[in-house]
Image (cartoon, rainbow, N blue to C red):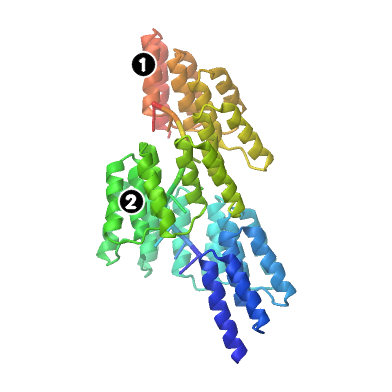
Amino acid sequence: MVCRYSTKLLNICVASYCKCQQMQKAEIVIIDGIRLGILPDVVTYNALVHGYCRFGGMDAAYSVLFRMREAGINPNVITYNTLIAGATRNRSLEQSLNLFEEMLQSGITPDVWSYNILMHCFFKLGKPDEANKVFQNVILKDLYPLSTTFNTMINGLCKNGHTSNAIILLKNLQRHGFVPQLVTYNILIDGLCKVGRLRAALRLLNEAKDLGLEPNAVTYTTLMKSCFRRRQYEHGLEIFFEMKNKGFAFDGFAYCTAVGAFLKLGWFEEANVWMARVIKSGVGIDLVFYNTFVNLYCKEGKLEAAYKLLDEIELRGLGCDDYTHAIIIDGLCRAGNIKGARQHLNYIYTSGFASNLVALNCLIDRYCKVGQIGHAMKLFKSMETKDSFTYTSLAHNLCKEGRFRCASKLLLSCLRGGIKVLKSTQRAVIDGLCDSGFTSEARKLRTKIRLAQLFH
DNA sequence: ATAGGGTTAG
């Protein structure tokens, strides 16, 4: 009895250390406990698995699974749920599916949470149909869906480009007695903002307020980000300071959003001040925060400092991601070191990274800006996927050189790929064609752009 | 433990 009680205390200790990124201290507490005769149980190991999934990477989490089996403790459904969710969070989606299979084969019966996590994983894989199958399965089985189950569905639909269906689902659920929570509203407000349906988003915000739900930090960050996306910086910053005045506990999300805006505006002093405040405030320093910091150094031209941060990211076991590398390659390009940028690109390819569209776009843009359009075109032709950024960079710079017919051809292939062309790019090419006497070509291009928009 | 944050063109 005494021993059970002690294990409970141990678990509280371990869980709280794991929560605040102090994995080493959590391990020390466990060792001290064993020395005193207090043995860790499933709950202890589950807390460790959870901590490592968040802060130490999946390999560290798997090693806990190994350790607990060695100690004669069997993983339970919570262990697997934590691992599956962790793999999903760490972008190892295939591993999540394998783990689910492994759980079934170990004779562990999945619970509602397992299915929620599985749904979430399918949505992240871009397979809404598979997620929906799981959803139907939960409803048909004798498992009671939780409000989280519905929120996961609504969120997944929004993230997979089916925001309208998400709204329809909400209305249907409401007819069956589902009471949306603030989370539900936050999900839909963000979804609507991202597809540009601002008025609908504000309607939902008011609906939430009418139900007595007070907007929280998530709501504010969502609205702030939506302003920055539309380049309404003043309005976005107003929301940022309103958050502060209302006494919301600032977290990394709000800070990174605001600093991102400062960088876009070129307000480096402001960005530095806020980054210092974040570090002082003691909020968890995660990969997104690091990436924001790397971006700040790159934009200031402090590449040495940026590289030091990359080392720190790896040292902490967070692992640089596509964002980090795109930011550093852009930084090298801006510093005029295209050779270094290409070397870094080769380096990430040999480290097992897939092709990085944003980094390639940065290189193309830089080649154009230094007048090496030939190099830009060569890179362009080697790319399997392109986006609006790729075409915009090339088209504008071709125009600058007076090569309007070439730019026109490019826009047409862009339209064929179903990629939108910015109004300013259209104008640059069409006006250029007109001014250099290719009036009929200009007319043809305009017609084709309009036709493409009709079918969009 | 379902929601918000970080990269590129004009």
Crowd band around label 1 with a 10 angstrom C-alpha radius: few (<14), some (14–19), many (20+): some
Which residue is label 2 attached to? A223
**Secondary structure category for the residue under label 2:** helix
Q: Is residue A204 left or right of residue A30?
A: left
Tell me, for residue A431, which label it has, or none: 1
Q: Is residue A24 left or right of residue A361?
A: right
Asked if residue A254 is positioned above or below residue A389 in the image, the reply reads below
Nearest the camera: A448 or A187? Answer: A187
Of callouts 1 and 2, the N-terminal one: 2
Task: Indicate the amino acid at tag 1.
Answer: Asp
Image quadrant in which you'd find residue A278: bottom left
Q: Is residue A30 left or right of residue A390?
A: right
Q: Quadrant of the N terminus of chain A?
A: bottom right
Image quadrant in which you'd find residue A113: bottom right
Dot in front, 1 or 2: 2
Estimate the x, y position of residue A272 in percent, counting from the top left: 40, 45
Tell me, for residue A167, which label it has, or none: none
**Residue in the picture at 27% in, 43% down:** A234
Q: Chain of mark 1?
A: A
Q: Residue furthest top?
A: A437
Estimate the x, y position of residue A19 in percent, counting from the top left: 51, 67
Marks 1/2 in contact by CB < 8 Å: the verdict is: no
